[in-house]
Image (cartoon, rainbow, N blue to C red):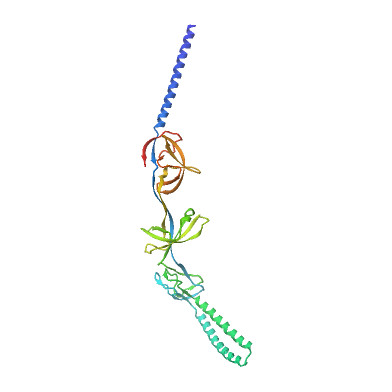
Amino acid sequence: MKKVNFVIAIVLILLTVFFIKVAFTKTSEKKHEGKEKVQKKVDAFIVSPSFLLSEITVTGELAAFNDVELKNEVAGRITIVNLPEGKFVKEGTLLVKLYDADLQASLMKMESQLDIQQRILERQKQLLRVNGISQNEYEQTLLQVNTIRADIAEEKALIRKTEVRAPFDGTIGLRDISVGAVVSASTLLAIIRTNQKIKLDFYVPEKYGPIISVGMKVHFTMANSDKNFEATVIATEQGIDNSTRNLKVRAILSSVSKELIPGAFANVNLQLGSNPKALMIPSHAIIPEEENKSVIVAQHGKAHFTDIKTGIRKSSMIEVTDGLEVGDTIITSGIMFLKEGDKLKYSNIKR
């Protein structure tokens, strides 16, 4: 009996020791976890108002104000070429002439016929006054005169089609033909441009369309120069492109220089306004979600997830239009490892 009691006592003592050890271990683990939770170090940023210039940068393209491909309207052999490459020509200058000797001969024949018929018509007019001929005979001769005149006008139009003249004052590009060449209709002869005036075409997203107005000043730079150039908006397409959802805008340059070459690309800067009290935060502090965006705000030393709305992005900073207040402290590092309610300890705080 004494031996049984002794064994029971030993078992009770061992169980007591075991439970004490387990309780002590759990307590130690909780303390350790709590300690680790408190010791999570993060970087923070205090939200404060700052001046924000609302602007966007889009790609544009320079183009000559007038830019035309010179082409002949009819086929033929070239007899005259007056395409001074890189030179200025006045409107109406004869640039290319095709062979037209056959048309000129036909024109001379018609003019001779017209001269004879006009003499006959004049004599018949006098005879009609004294009833020497009938009214019908006179009108038949008048019809012949008018028909010949119409044929002459048609022949002159055909002769005009053998000529290519400058449609406006401009500079000739590189020519692609020579005297003696036989060309077909619509053969490219050269390109004429008005380099004295250059236009700038660019596209803006549809949400900025209402802001664009005639007379608005835009600034741009070229890839081959750091110089800033200015242009003035003269018109818009008056409709959004269905495929790109952009609005086409056209501006005229206020000055011309050797850096501005038609066809070159330009980086166009549009200043859309300013906000002296914009709330700007580091863009890497934002947690993107399927439909919303959020940031982690420090509230009473603990992490709290807050939905926000954003506006203009400026390099590494982005505007917050809704969801934050001045003085809020947001977390900028370790945001992927934090959970709602985690205690925070700061290693660096920026303003």
The structure residue drawn at horizontal position 54% and vertical position 81%, both measured from the top left corner, is 152
- The answer to whether 218 is drawn above or below residue 87 in the figure is above
* Whole-percent x, y for residue 255 in the image: 38, 64
Residue at image point 45% right, 15% down = 14
Is 111 situated above or below 344? below
Q: Nearer the viewer, residue 319 or 173?
A: 319
Report if residue 225 is visible in the image. no
Q: On the picture, is 128 further left or further right than 187?
A: right
Q: For residue 146, say whether it is visible.
A: yes
Relative side of 125 to 176, left or right: right
Residue 258 placed where, x, y %? 37, 64
Q: Quadrant of the C terminus?
A: top left
Pinpoint residue 284: horizontal percent, then vertical percent: 42, 43
Q: Residue at x 48, y 9 (%)?
A: 5
Examine the rendered structure and indicate whether residue 76 appears above or below residue 307: below
Q: Nearer the viewer, residue 290 or 156?
A: 290
The furthest residue to the top: 1
Vertical arrangement, residue 15 with respect to residue 210, above or below: above
Residue at left 57%, top 83%? 146
Q: Position of residue 71 (x, y in %)?
A: 48, 70
For the residue pair 239 and 214, the one nearer the viewer reads as 214
